[in-house]
Amino acid sequence: MEININAVASPANETFSADWRTFESAHRLRSVTLLTDSVETTWDDARISSYHFLWLRDNCPCSQCVHPATREQMFEVVDAPENLVAGSVSLDVTGALNVQWSDGHRSLYEAGWLRSHAYDETSRSERAAQLRSVRPWDSKLVIPTFDYASVMSSDRVLLDWLLAARDVGLTLLTGMPETGKALETVATRISFIRESNFGMTFKVRTKVEAVDSNAYTALELPAHTDLPTRELQPGLQFLHCLINDATGGESTFVDGFAIAAALRANSPEDFRLLCEHPVEFWNKAPQSDYRSYAPVIGLDSRGEVSEIRLANWLRAPFNLPASEMGAFYRAYRHFSALTRDSRFIVSHRLEAGQMWCFDNRRTMHARKAFDQASGKRFLRGCYMDRDELLSRILVLQRNDPGRSIRAA
Amino acid sequence: MEININAVASPANETFSADWRTFESAHRLRSVTLLTDSVETTWDDARISSYHFLWLRDNCPCSQCVHPATREQMFEVVDAPENLVAGSVSLDVTGALNVQWSDGHRSLYEAGWLRSHAYDETSRSERAAQLRSVRPWDSKLVIPTFDYASVMSSDRVLLDWLLAARDVGLTLLTGMPETGKALETVATRISFIRESNFGMTFKVRTKVEAVDSNAYTALELPAHTDLPTRELQPGLQFLHCLINDATGGESTFVDGFAIAAALRANSPEDFRLLCEHPVEFWNKAPQSDYRSYAPVIGLDSRGEVSEIRLANWLRAPFNLPASEMGAFYRAYRHFSALTRDSRFIVSHRLEAGQMWCFDNRRTMHARKAFDQASGKRFLRGCYMDRDELLSRILVLQRNDPGRSIRAA
C-alpha cells in the first residue's frame, strides 16, 4: 500500500497531527482563562467551553505524544504527574491554544480541533443531534433505487447509496449482471464481506436436504432479521437475484424501528418488556450450535432504538420469571402482529438483475411461500458489518469537499 | 454436506424433534394440575414447575409446528387464539406431558425437555449458575499449554484447549510448524476466521511506512484489547510466532476481568464510572475510519463483567459532562495503573513454533519494545468470534458422551 501522508491531510503544522481529518470552524477563540483544574475558553459566538487539565494533556498532539506516521497516541495519561497543572495559557497568532505545563511539557491545540471536540453541554448536544440520521418509513416508502454501473463508477453515487442504506435501511440496485461474481464485486466496492456459518456468500434455493435453515425450504418466512443467533447480527444484508421464474416468493419488508416507535407510543409497557428481557436465539444444526441472548428491541446508551433482533423460528423457549410470562407473550404477539400490519409493509418481487441491500438490524424481511414446481428461483447473498458501512461513508465524505466535517 | 439426521439425535418419537440435542433427566413428573392460565407440574424431587399455556403452545414440538428436517419452528405464536386454554392434560406411559388444546391441537412434551427448560426460580438459578465458568487469574498463572499435533488429531484435546480459552482466556500452543499456513490450519480446526480491516490474517513486523497502527512499529504497546474500534471486538486472538531473533518484544498479559474485580472491590466509584460512561475508540487511517462507542468495562444483563475494551492509543477525546471529567480521569488512570501492576502480569517470550490463543475481550495483551537491529521478529495473527468458540464447544460436548447436556 503506497501512502502519501501529505496528500491525505494537511495540518497547519506538525503539532496538529492527531487525526487524518482537518477541523475547520467558522469560530475563533476570543479569550482563555486559567482556572484551578481547567482552561476556560470563550468563543467569538460567546460559547464557553472548559477543558480539564488532564483532558488537554491527554490530547496533546505533538510528535512526542502522537506517532507522526500512525497519528496514534504514544503518551499514556496514567504517566501524567498527579499534581499536573497548566502554568500558563495563551493564544498564538494563528488563534491556537498554547499551554505550558508544570512539568515542562508544552502543547498547542488548533482552534478548529478544540471546537470540534469541546464537551460543554451545547457542543455535546450538537454532536449528539448529528448522529441521529434515521429516516423511518411505512408502506408508502419509495424504495431508494440505484444503478449498478453508476455505483461502480462514481464515488458520489456510491456515497448516496450508502447514506440511503444507513438512514433508510432499504435500497434496491438495478442493472446488475445476472451471473458471475456481481454480488462480490459490488459488496467489495464498499469493503470486505463478513463470513458466517453459511459461508462467505450463501445461496437461497431449496435444497433436497434442507437441514440448515427454514430459509432453504420453499416455506413462507415471517418477518425476521438474519443471524439473531449471533452476538452481533450482520449490519447489511445483500440479496442478488439471478433467476426468478417461480410463482410467489415476493420479498416484503417492514421498518423495525418504525414498528418499535409505534409500540413505544401506543403500548409503552409492551415496549419496555421487549427492551428489558433478553431472549435466547438458537441455531440448532448438526454441525453448529449458536446461541445468543439479547432483547428483541435493543436500545443505545441514549435510549434510542438501535437494533431489532427477531426470527421466530430461531427463538429458544422464553426463560423469564413466571410472573412476567403472560405479559411477555402479550408484548411479543403484539410486536409480531405489527410486522404483519399492511400499514408498514413494502412489497416487491425481486427480478433477475436486481439486488436488495438493507439494514439487517433494522429492516425485517419476509418471503412469501413459492411454488417450487412453477420455475427456478435462485438468489445469492452475503453480509457486511455496520462498521464497514460507516467507515466507508466517513472516508468518502472525507474526500468529498462538499461533505467534509465542519464544526458548528 | 452429507447429513444423516438420525445419527445426530435420536428422539424417542417424531413429536420430540425441536432440538438436535437429547434431554436426559434423572427426574420424572409425578403429577400435573391444570390451572387457569398454566399447567403446574410436580417432579419426583418435589420441585414445582409451572408452564404458561402460551409458552407450552409456543413450544409444541409436533411435525406440524416444527419442520422435521431443520427442526426449526414453523408455527407462530401470534396465530394462537386469544382465548386458547388447555382443555385437558395427562401424563402418558413414557412420562411425557400430553396437552389437548381448546382449538383441537394436541401437544406432547418429553419430561427431560420440560425439566431442562423449566422457568421456575430454582431451575432458572441452576441454569444461570452453569453459565458462570470464568476462572480469574493473576501473575501466578500456569499458562494452559497444548501440543499442536494433539489438538489436530484428538477431539478431546481440542475440547480441553477450547474450554481453557473460554474459561481462563489465555492458552499457549507448542510444537507448531514454523512456516506455512499452520495458523490457518489450527484456527479452522475450530471454525472460520473473522476478517478485519487488517485482512483475513495479519503480519506483525515493523513496516517502513507504519501508517496503519502502532502495532506495526517497534514501540512498546501498553496492555490493550485488539480492535476496540469495532462494535464487536474479536473474541479470540491467535498470534503465531515464525521468527523471534530480536532482543526484547516479550508478550505480557493481564486478566482484565481480575483487574475489573479488584477495581470493583476497592474503588466501586471508579468501577461504576468505567461501566457507565461509553468511550469512543477511533481507528484513524488513510483508507478507513472506524469508530465505536462503548464502556471500558462491559456488563451483561446479570451485572457480571463480560468485556474489557481498551487500547489507549485508539481512544477518542473523552466526551463526558464537564462535571464528571475529573472523576473519570481518576478512574481511567486507576484502571491503567492496575494493568501495570506486577501482581497481575504474566510474561512469556513467544518463541518460533509457539502460538498464543487468548480471549481478546478479556485478556489484555502488551508488548515490550524490541530492538529492530538485533534480529528479525515475525508473527502472524488472526481473529475469531466468541460465537464460533462457543458453538464448537457445544458441538464437541454433544458428541462427547461424558460431557453431554444433562438437566439437574
Image (spheres, coloured by chain):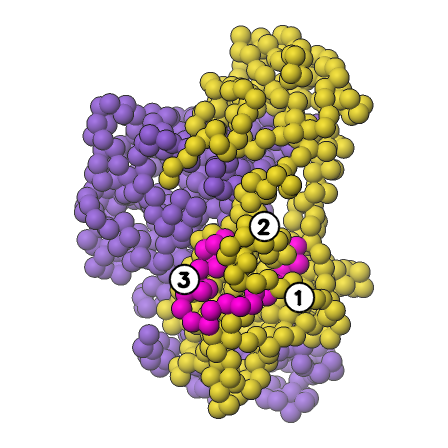
Chain colours: A yellow, B purple
Q: Is residue A368 magenta?
A: no
Residue B230 location (% of width, % of height) = 51, 45
Which residue is at 30% across, 30% downward? B250
Chain letter of disc 1 in the image: A
Say what secondary structure mark 1 lies in. loop
**Residue A165 visible here:** yes
Chain letter of disc 3 in the image: A
User: Where, by quadrant of the figure, is residue B332 drawn?
Assistant: top right
Q: CA distance from mark 2 to mark 3?
A: 28 Å
Residue A377 location (% of width, % of height) = 48, 80
Query: Is residue B289 toward the left or the right of residue B166 in the image?
Result: right
Residue type, label 1: Ile
Residue type, label 3: Met
First in residue order: circle 2 vs circle 1: 1
The circle on residue A273 is: none
> Which segment is the magenta one?
A166-190
Which residue is at 22% across, 23% downward? B374
* Eye-nearest disc, 2 or 1: 2
Residue type, label 2: Arg
Say what secondary structure mark 3 lies in. loop
Q: Is residue A169 magenta?
A: yes
Q: CA distance from mark 1 to mark 3?
A: 27 Å
Which residue is at 53% across, 62% downward? A148
- Determine which residue is flagged by label 1: A143
With respect to residue B228, does B302 lie above or below?
below
With respect to residue B24, does A127 lie above or below?
above
Image quadrant in which the C terminus of chain A is located = top right
Residue B70 location (% of width, % of height) = 45, 78
- Determine which residue is flagged by label 2: A156
* Eye-nearest disc, 1 or 3: 1
First in residue order: circle 2 vs circle 3: 2
The circle on residue A200 is: 3
